[in-house]
Image (cartoon, grey):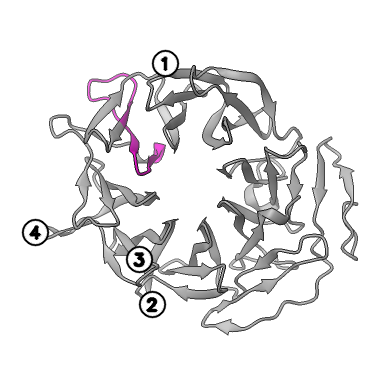
């Protein structure tokens, strides 16, 4: 076994051949803490081995989809027609509801610095909502002085000081400068009719916005790019190959995407260098750490595994071999997150069971170890989210197996060695 009831940490080999290290959390007593409305603050599930893992909520209401930036953590609390957005300050250990309504559907928060955005349902339509952590102001971003509230499709995403969303009819894509703007900015070309493929993703940072749009003339879809320094959109028509782009991801000037032919593709938005990274993968993400640019994606050899390929940022060509980050008979990385050299994923699932049988795994690419750390020992852990120094996820507490008991957990990645 990997950890005993006294909290000892032991290395071992899973029956499938994957070496892991498990942090055993079963040795703790029943949790307790101060109540704040329906939120319970700083519920420690720490053992002697991992001194900085905390359970942030304990309310049996369902807390899900955490997002984290710096020392600020946000998530959705509730189910169905009664969902709100909550914020936890890691420094002060204070929790607050930041969505203004007590009854409604507020979901899919995204955070950058002091800016929080989410999708708010009003009258069976969704709108882009905003909260400023510094001064407590809130407003609806998708609004117009003449048309009033303008509905959106899909989640609101954020990068740097900018937010991005798609109109409800998919005919427009908008950005909003959160520090000083008063109105949304349309990013598409007024002379080109677009139909944004919202399911394929759209992302933004302070320099670029990217999205996928249908090709009006038929053929492969395009990737739309808005360079804020230039003030106009451009299109990567038939970028890299003739397959439809899917699941795009943006970090700095580096763009990656999967396609419907299961190719993994790379494009440098500042130099125009492009390359095919791999054939036979899906849902890539790109991350930078030190002088390294690494692409991480999902592959399938009968079960889902994670793979890494380093890229030369100048030539765009792969450096070295493809490195498998997991290799076993379980599903790993169906959902994963990257931040710098850090990777976290839900894994260890029996194929076909999804998050019901999953745990949370963590790996630092800059460390000397290629062995993932298994951070949880209770099935039902999902949606990992990384910042520079923290990892959050939602999952079932120890001993809970029923529905509606998803809680938020937080780890200090500096202690995960």
- The answer to whether mark 4 and mark 1 are in CB contact below 8 A is no
Element type at mark 2: loop
Q: Label 2, label 3: how many angstroms apart (C-alpha)?
A: 15 Å
Badge number at residue 168: none
Tell me the residue that label 1 is attached to.
241
Q: Earlier in the sequence, mark 2 or mark 1?
A: 2
Q: Label 3, label 1: how many angstroms apart (C-alpha)?
A: 41 Å
Q: Is residue 223 magenta?
A: yes
Tell me the residue that label 4 is attached to.
146
The span shown in magenta is 199-224
Element type at mark 1: loop
- Which residue is pictured at 58% across the width and 35% down the height? 290
Q: Earlier in the sequence, mark 4 or mark 1?
A: 4
- Which residue is pictured at 34% across the width and 39% down the height? 207
- Which residue is pictured at 60% across the width and 41% down the height? 334
Is residue 301 in view?
no
Q: Nearer the viewer, mark 2 or mark 3?
A: 3
Q: Label 3, label 4: how many angstroms apart (C-alpha)?
A: 23 Å
Q: Position of residue 101 (x, y in %)?
A: 35, 75
- The answer to whether mark 2 and mark 1 are in CB contact below 8 A is no
- Which residue is pictured at 27% across the width and 52% down the height? 177
Tell me the residue that label 3 is attached to.
131
Q: Earlier in the sequence, mark 3 or mark 1?
A: 3
Q: Label 2, label 1: how many angstroms apart (C-alpha)?
A: 49 Å
Q: Is residue 200 above or below residue 89?
A: above
């Amino acid at each position: 076994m990997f950890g005993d009831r006294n909290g000892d940490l032991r290395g071992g080999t899973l029956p499938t051949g994957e070496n892991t290290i498990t942090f055993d959390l079963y040795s703790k007593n029943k949790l307790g803490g101060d109540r704040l409305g329906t939120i319970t603050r700083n519920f420690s599930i720490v053992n002697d081995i991992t001194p900085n893992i905390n359970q942030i909520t304990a309310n049996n209401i369902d807390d899900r989809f955490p997002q984290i930036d710096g020392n600020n953590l946000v998530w959705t609390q509730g189910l169905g027609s009664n969902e709100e957005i909550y914020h936890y300050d890691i420094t002060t250990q204070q929790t607050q509801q930041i969505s203004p309504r007590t009854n409604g559907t507020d979901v899919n928060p995204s955070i950058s610095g002091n800016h929080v955005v989410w999708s708010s349902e009003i009258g069976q339509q969704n709108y882009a909502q905003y909260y400023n952590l510094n001064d407590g102001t809130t407003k609806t971003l998708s609004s117009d002085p003449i048309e009033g509230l303008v509905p959106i499709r899909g989640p609101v995403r954020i990068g740097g000081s900018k937010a991005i969303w798609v109109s409800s009819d998919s005919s427009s894509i908008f950005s909003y400068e959160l520090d000083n703007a008063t109105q949304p900015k349309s990013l598409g070309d007024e002379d080109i009719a677009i139909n944004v493929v919202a399911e394929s993703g759209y992302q933004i940072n302070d320099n670029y916005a990217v999205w996928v749009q249908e090709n009006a003339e038929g053929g492969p879809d395009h990737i739309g790019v808005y360079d804020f320094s230039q003030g106009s959109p451009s299109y990567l028509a038939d970028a890299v190959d003739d397959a439809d782009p899917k699941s795009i991801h943006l970090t700095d000037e580096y763009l990656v995407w999967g396609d419907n032919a299961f190719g993994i593709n790379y494009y440098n938005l500042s130099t125009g260098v492009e390359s095919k990274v791999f054939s036979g993968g899906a849902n890539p993400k790109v991350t930078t750490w030190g002088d390294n640019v690494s692409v991480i994606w999902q592959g399938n050899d009968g079960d889902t595994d994670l793979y890494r390929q380093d890229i030369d940022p100048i030539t765009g060509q792969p450096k070295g071999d493809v490195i498998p980050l997991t290799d076993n008979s379980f599903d790993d990385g169906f959902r994963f997150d990257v931040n710098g050299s850090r990777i976290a994923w839900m894994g260890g699932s029996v194929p076909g069971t999804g998050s019901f049988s999953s745990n949370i795994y963590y790996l630092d690419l800059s460390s000397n170890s290629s062995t993932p750390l298994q951070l949880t020992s209770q099935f039902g852990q999902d949606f990992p989210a990384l910042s520079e120094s923290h990892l959050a996820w939602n999952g079932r507490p120890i001993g809970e197996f029923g529905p509606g008991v998803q809680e938020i957990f937080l780890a200090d990645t500096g202690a995960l060695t």
